[in-house]
Image: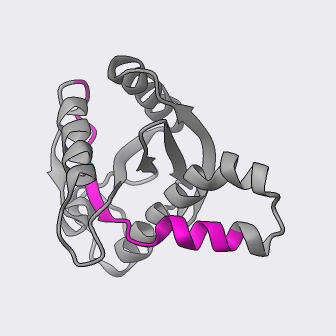
Amino acid sequence: MAILTIDELATRLPPHQAIAGLDLGTKTIGVSVSDLGRRFASPREVIRRVKFGIDAQALLALAAKEKIAAFVIGFPVNMDGSEGPRCQATRAFVRNMGEKTDIPFVLWDERLSTVAAERVLIEMDVSRKKRAERIDSAAASFILQGALDRLALLPKGDAGAPGD
């Protein structure tokens, strides 16, 4: 498993496979999955964190079921661009996942993704209780959609078919 930049990922992605977006929290992992054309991010049910081994099994089961070619994980840099303890925890999670899978990860700047997700849920008139249940996967969708939008602008490598 490798940590790739979004540019590197664009050259290595096989056609017709989805990408998963992850919003890593201390209690849950928000999950989103792209369509096979990699144009739209759709939220999935959150994974309740238990311990790393169980969390990893849940992610790998999702990856097998959804034909995931890569994970885009939110990278929680501070507003000034510096990396704090949450970035270290995210890097450790990705490093540990690397021992369990060859699926590549992209670290994606997630600044304000939760704020944006919260605003959308409020605009949709989702109750406070339901927002709490959905916020992590909604944030994962914002993270993934940003990466998908960037991928759409990048040249594809030999792994992608024309028009993919």
Quarter of the image holding residue 59?
top left
Quadrant in the picture for residue 101: top left
Q: Which residues are magenta?
A: 100-120
Residue 145 is at least partly visible in this image:
no
Is 105 on the left-hand or right-hand side of 129? left
- The residue lying toward the viewer, choosing from 156 and 88, is 88
Q: Is there any visible trace of residue 21 in the rendered image?
A: yes
Give the tally of numbered discs.
Answer: 0
| Residue at x 41%, y 18% (from the top left corner) | 54
In front here: 86 or 11? 86
User: Going by the image, does 70 lie left or right of 62?
Assistant: left
Residue occupying the point 52% across, 64% down: 114
Image coordinates for residue 14, horizontal then vertical, percent: 33, 51
Q: How is the image coloured?
A: one colour
Would you identify the image quadrant in which residue 141 lies?
A: bottom right
Q: Nearer the viewer, residue 110 or 105?
A: 110
Q: Quadrant of the N terminus?
A: top left
Image spot of residue 133 (x, y percent)? 68, 45
**Residue 159: x, y in percent?**
27, 56
- Residue 97, compared with residue 118, is above or below; it is above
Residue at (38%, 66%) from the top-left corner? 110
Vertically, is 55 above or below 158? above
- Does residue 103 belong to the magenta stretch? yes
Instruction: Please determine whether, in this image, residue 85 is positioned above or below residue 93.
Output: below
The residue that appears at 38% across and 71% down in the rendered structure is 111
In the picture, the quarter occupied by the C terminus is bottom left
Expressed as whole percent of the image width and height from the top left, the position of residue 37 reads 51, 61
Q: Is residue 53 magenta?
A: no
- Residue 130 lies left or right of residue 103; in this view the side is right
